[in-house]
Amino acid sequence: MNLFGNYSFGFIFVAIAVVHFIRRRPDNYWLWIIIMGGGVGALIYIAAEVLPDLGLLRQSFQIFSHRKRIRQLEMIVLDNPSAGNYEELADLYLEQKKFGKAKECYDRAISSRTDSPDPFYRRGLCEMELNDFPSAVADLERVVRMDGNYDYQRAAGLLAYAWARNNQDEQAASLFEHITLTSTLSETQFNYAQFLAAKGKMPEARQWAQRVLSKKATMPRYLKRRERPWFRRASALLKRLPA
């Protein structure tokens, strides 16, 4: 039997490829390959883009185990409300994107004796997701004072972003200028581009957005997959900015 000549198999391959394309949004040329190539084009796409994503199944199994651990910890903290138990529960809530619950647990885990930047950093991430930028500023300032390069300088980049969202523009501009001298994080570069655009500095904003997109030419495929959200955001920003 000719696999690719069989309409039903070809349709299934195309359907799988299109659904994956919509959800993962790789380069647009793949859509033409799927449409013009039919079953063969879809199978090529599946081999190049879908199969590498099968590694995400392992993360799905981890999610189920994390949910089980969350239920266990929710019971444990009733009898043993230690800082360690609350911090572990907070970390799991954060991975599940339950930012409100995670922040509540970090509040309980953090005390006057806490000397690690990690719970303050993670609570700051929750506060940013909850649009509580004054609180995020306080936590991230503490983290950066403790370790200016924390999380590969991401903490400093996020502090600059939080300052910008908290109307502390002078501090944000100064830190963005300083951190982008050495940081290559797409998140930080994109946030700086947005900040510059908001201040009316369109050429500089375009330059930093383009810097994010320029990485695609030399970046390994596995990193391109991870950086896709920032590529999409940078591309959308460039379209909005005047030439």
Image: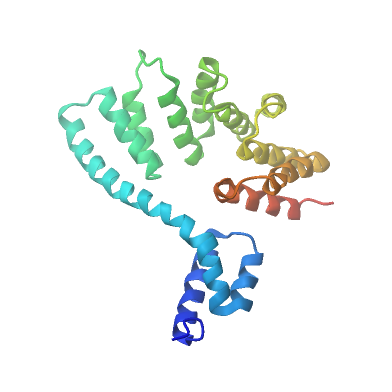
Q: Is residue 59 above or below residue 185?
A: below
Q: Is residue 106 above or below residue 22?
A: above
**Rendered residue at 60%/32% (across/down):** 166
Outermost residue on the front side: it is: 1
* Residue 22 is at least partly visible in this image: no
* Residue 140 is at least partly visible in this image: yes
Query: Which of 242/214 is in front?
Result: 214
Outermost residue on the left side: it is: 79
Q: How is the image coloured?
A: rainbow
**Rendered residue at 24%/40% (across/down):** 69
Query: Which of 109/48 is in front?
Result: 48
**Looking at the rendering, which quadrant does residue 29 occupy?**
bottom right
Query: Which of 119/218 is in front?
Result: 218
Residue 69 relative to residue 175: left or right: left
Residue 164: x and y, percent? 64, 33
Residue 77 relative to residue 1: left or right: left
Residue 81 relative to residue 182: left or right: left
Residue 62: x and y, percent? 32, 46
Residue 56: x and y, percent? 41, 52
**Rendered residue at 70%/53% (across/down):** 235
